[in-house]
Image (tube, grey):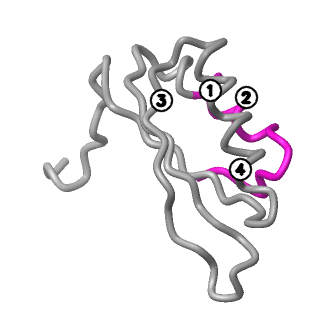
Amino acid sequence: MSSSNKKQELQFPCRWEFRLVAVAETLEKTRAAVEAVNETEKAGFEITAGESSGSGRYTALRVACEVDSLERARSLASILSKIEGVRFLI
């Protein structure tokens, strides 16, 4: 197997970034909900505004943190994806 075909293994802890695509109209409410998750999960989120869609209907929020396992990243993704106003999570 050549080195280009090897799967890269994740090393934990590592920095993880989520991109939430949210309805622009309710972005402040969505951001407040992300901050509440940060407090309850003690996740250490760094939250920054991302790009807006061409129509201006959607805006991205970048949420970065350090995770100690893939299970933790999946758990946070599940919680974040259920926030009102989040259309999808990358």
State which region is magenta.
Answer: 74-90
- Mark number for residue 79? 2
Return the x and y of residue 13 as percentages of the image width and height.
31, 17
Depth check, mark 1 against mark 4: the one in front is 4
Proximity of marks 2 and 3: CB atoms separated by less than 8 Å:
no
For marks 2 and 1, give the CA distance.
5 Å
Depth check, mark 3 against mark 4: the one in front is 4
Secondary structure of the residue carrying numbered label 4: helix
Which label's residue is closer to the chain start, 1 or 4? 4
Three-letter code, disc 1: Leu
Q: Which residue is mark 4?
A: 28
Depth check, mark 4 against mark 2: the one in front is 4
Q: Quick check: 74 above or below 90?
A: above
Proximity of marks 3 and 4: CB atoms separated by less than 8 Å:
no
Secondary structure of the residue carrying numbered label 1: helix
Q: Nearer the viewer, residue 1 or 85?
A: 85
Proximity of marks 2 and 1: CB atoms separated by less than 8 Å:
yes
Residue count near mark 2 (Cα–Cα under 10 Å), binned few <14, some 14–19, many ≥20: few
Three-letter code, disc 4: Glu
Count the numbered circles shown: 4
Proximity of marks 3 and 1: CB atoms separated by less than 8 Å:
no
37 relative position to 52: left or right:
right
Return the x and y of residue 3 as percentages of the image width and height.
14, 49
Depth check, mark 3 against mark 1: the one in front is 3
Which label's residue is closer to the chain start, 4 or 2? 4
Q: Which residue is mark 1?
A: 76
Q: Which residue is mark 3?
A: 45
Q: State the residue at coordinates (74%, 45%).
A: 30
Which label's residue is closer to the chain start, 3 or 1? 3
What residue occupies the far front of the structure in this picture? 28
9 relative position to 39: left or right:
left
For marks 4 and 2, give the CA distance.
18 Å
